[in-house]
Image (tube, helix red, strand yellow):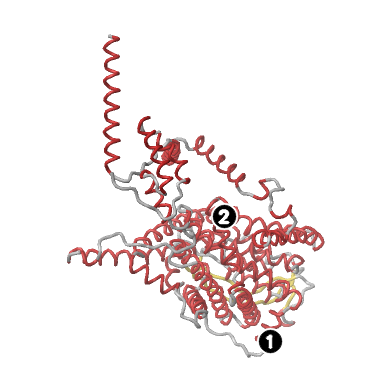
Amino acid sequence: MAPWPEVEKPETNNYIGDSSKQNQNMTGKEGENHKGNVASLGNKGEIQPAFSTIALIDETRPEEDDPWALPELQDTGVKWSELDRKGKIIRVLYGIGKFIMLLGLLYLFVCSLDVLSSAFQLVGGKAAGDIFKDDSVLSNPVAGLVIGVLVTVMVQSSSTSSSIIVSMVSSTLLTVQSAIPIIMGANIGTSVTNTIVALMQAGDRNEFRRAFAGATIHDFFNWLAVFALLPIEVISGYLYHLTNAIVESFHLESGEDAPELLKVITDPFTKLIIELDKSVINAIATNDESAKNKSLVKIWCETKTNVTLQNVTIPPSENCTSSDLCWTDGNRTWTLKNITETENISKCRHLFADANLPDLAIGLILLALSLLVLCSCLVMIVKLLNSVLKGQVASVIKKTINTDFPFPFTWLAGYLAMLAGAGMTFVVQSSSVFTSAITPLVGIGVISIERSYPLTLGANIGTTTTAILAALASPGSTLKYSLQIALCHFFFNISGIILFYPLPFTRLPIRMCKTLGNVTAKYRWFAIFYLLVCFFLLPLFVFGLSLAGWPVLLGVCLPLFVLFIAVIVINIMQKRRPHSLPEKLQNWDFLPIWLHSLEPWDNIIMSSLSFCGKHCCGFCKCCKVNAEEEGAKDKQLKTMEVYENTIAMADEERGGRRASAAACVEKTGTNNTAL
């Protein structure tokens, strides 16, 4: 036997309790000898051989891993230096093929987002236009805020909702002051896309934790900016006065069309699938009754407008266009008027140009197809990135994106990331596309949460610069209003960045999204609950109260808001200064468990899903696999045993074989006796 190792600080009591488990695998005589050894070892300051390896493992065991630490993307393949010439050529070709495939998947991903936006407009575009009709509701800033959220979620495009607002302002149906809260709401609604994209990474808990936090950091920034700046705007109107002074100080003239960068590449493909007439939504919002029966699907892509002078009948009481060009024929009065007629020349070439389907049916078809393509592209992009971003390539990219500058220029890295996010968003002309593209990178650990925050803030700025360029290309009648609204959007985001980025302790969205990420990693159904509440149920609830008037809205929302703030403050004090609270408020145990824990809700939801899985899809292959996995978990696994040397292992194996052989002989003898 090898000598027993000496330890500096023996803790034999930690292992005495476990010795009974080990002794169950020994014979009675061996067990007695072993117990004697343990007692003697305790006197000598030594530990028994069967547990010394466990002790060494426990002493050197690292602390629990940080779930937010970026994983090491290690390359498990053959090293480049170990490949022959043929292997190197094949690897280079594989790399080029993966890069081309990645570009193709990114192209399909962006196109699917465009089609998804069109699908949402077909499903809810007319309803979104109808929402803007009630002037009394729009004058309420809280109602305007939730209307902006709902409309942008319904049409999946902040640029579309902004164009509706510009049309209403230029038609004097809405003032610029009333439009500012709607713009704030549109800023919130545009962040729903990357939150939906994050749901596609729910398969792996750690990836989902990072991806969902990286997506919702956009939501938290927008909500916090609104909570801070909307009351200031209502009281002082600083955004209106600032942008009005800027617009009035320049002599503005309508310029050329805004540049289209990414649209030049994606439009040829997306226009083969669907093409919309977005002027219909604007017409509905501006109370044009003739637009209600029009379809959003564009049928004729090339038209010609003719203006002709024709004889028309007019009521006798109506003034003639000219006394010389007006005459009466019996009971009818005739005059000459310029009549504008639209001549259809060529039809559009998209898939639904000749389909006799309502807008809702086409929208639902496109919604299902675009979500399918979006999910498939995202899954394959993540797999490709996992296979490409390994070893030195991954380390270089991670260091480039996440590394800070040396002191005293550490603060500069975040602002450069913000500038990069603004530039990339300007190129793709959509903050949703950019934030949705970086969400899987956050999930697999290439971009940290701390770095994704300035990138997202830059995306917020980038999308407003695109809106400013589009406003400068507006016709003269709407140029002033469209530019002022675009500038309001720009300065709103700048104000939010000033409040929630420069100082580290003001970066509340990072801490909030990490808390939500931990919750959704443990209870993955909570992600869907969050999505429904923040972007649908809560705005609809507030909108319904706003229809009842100011007294009802304040009477219901104000107590709920005060309760919400009080719960947050008590939670913070429970973690940091619990002794400053009354004894009853130092924890939430005095409440029913379902009011302060998600565990009961999780049990209900999981049992419901399990019931549905057994009774609804019991014959599916996936359900059978899950049942087999559950059955495998129920089986009791044999405990591993640790030995100091191989002699003890060999002795036990020989003893086991002898015991089994003796049992077989005894059984055979018994059978022979019976015969």
Question: Which sits in the foreground, 558 or 234?
Answer: 558
Asked if residue 139 lies left or right of residue 202, the reply is right
- Mark 2: few/some/many CA within 10 Å (<14, 14-19, 20+): some
Question: Which sits in the foreground, 344 or 24?
Answer: 24
Give the residue pinned by disc 1.
Answer: 245
Question: Which sits in the foreground, 554 or 559?
Answer: 559
Would you say residue 332 is visible in this rendering? yes
Q: Which mark is on residue 282?
A: none
- Say which quarter of the image contains residue 570: bottom right
Q: Is residue 652 above or below residue 237?
A: above
Amino acid type of the residue that numbered disc 1 sits on in the rendered structure: Ala
- x then y, percent, for residue 581: 73, 59
Amino acid type of the residue that numbered disc 2 sits on in the rendered structure: Val
Question: In percent of the image, x 43 and y 39: which residue is there?
Answer: 19
Pointer 1 or 2: first along the chain: 1
Locate the N terminus and report the quarter of the image it occupies.
Answer: top left
- Say which quarter of the image contains residue 134: bottom right
- x then y, percent, for residue 282: 63, 68
Give the residue pinned by disc 2.
Answer: 519
